[in-house]
């Protein structure tokens, strides 16, 4: 039974080779027939298109290989960084130095944020403005 299978596989391989050779021969004959009927300008355009495609194929294969390698590295990093199920990430609490409880117990705002501070403005290039006028305009 193995002998029959090997013969069948050998015939199939020979048939594939013959079909490939026939396809290549057909393409060469077709190219010669079409090439003999085209003008010089049309042949130049066709040759340029074929050379452009020929140059683009290795470049695209190189880009594909680099992209695939980078994606595999990212996937491996993601797999390594996933914690096992049931594990909790560490909790870090950062408090500024002045955030302790106040003596009154309810955490009031610091004095700098409680009351507005009187501000003095200097207008450059204009008439001098009296401070009383500015404070009156601000509260009205």
Image (tube, helix red, strand yellow):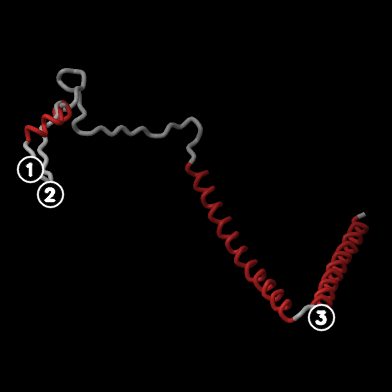
Q: Is residue 132 above or below residue 53?
A: above
Q: Quadrant of the C terminus?
A: top left
Please report the residue visible at 9 percent of the width from the left and 44 percent of the height from the top: 127
C-alpha distance separating marks 1 and 2: 9 Å
Kindly indicate the quadrant of the structure image that contains residue 98.
top left
Kindly indicate the quadrant of the structure image that contains residue 122.
top left
Horizontal and vertical percent for residue 76?
53, 48
Kindly indicate the quadrant of the structure image that contains residue 23.
bottom right
Horizontal and vertical percent for residue 113?
17, 29
Circles 1 and 2: CB distance less than 8 Å? no
Foreground mark, 2 or 3?
2
Residue tagged 3: 36
C-alpha distance separating marks 2 and 3: 85 Å
Q: Is residue 128 above or below residue 24?
A: above
Residues packed near mark 1 inside 10 Å, few (<14), some (14 to 19) or many (20 plus) = few
Q: Nearer the viewer, residue 25 or 14?
A: 25
Residue tagged 2: 125
Please report the residue visible at 50 percent of the width from the left and 44 percent of the height from the top: 80
Q: Is residue 10 above or below residue 132?
A: below
Residue tagged 1: 128
Q: Which mark is residue 116?
A: none
The disc, 1 or 3, on the residue closer to the chain's N-terminal end is 3
Q: Nearer the viewer, residue 79 or 57?
A: 57
Please report the residue visible at 31 percent of the width from the left and 32 percent of the height from the top: 93
Q: Is residue 80 left or right of residue 119?
A: right
């Amino acid at each position: 039974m193995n002998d029959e299978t090997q013969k069948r596989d050998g015939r199939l391989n020979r048939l594939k080779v013959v079909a490939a050779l026939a396809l290549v021969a057909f393409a060469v004959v077709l190219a010669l027939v079409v090439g003999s009927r085209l003008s010089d300008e049309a042949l130049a355009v066709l040759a340029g298109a074929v050379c452009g495609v020929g140059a683009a194929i290795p470049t695209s294969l190189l880009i594909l290989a680099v992209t695939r390698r980078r994606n595999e590295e990212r996937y491996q990093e993601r797999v390594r960084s996933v914690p096992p199920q049931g594990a909790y990430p560490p909790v870090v609490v950062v408090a500024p130095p002045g955030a302790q409880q106040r003596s009154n117990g309810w955490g009031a705002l610091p004095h700098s944020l409680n009351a507005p501070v009187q501000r003095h403005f200097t207008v450059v290039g204009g008439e001098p403005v009296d401070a009383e006028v500015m404070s009156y305009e601000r509260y009205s």
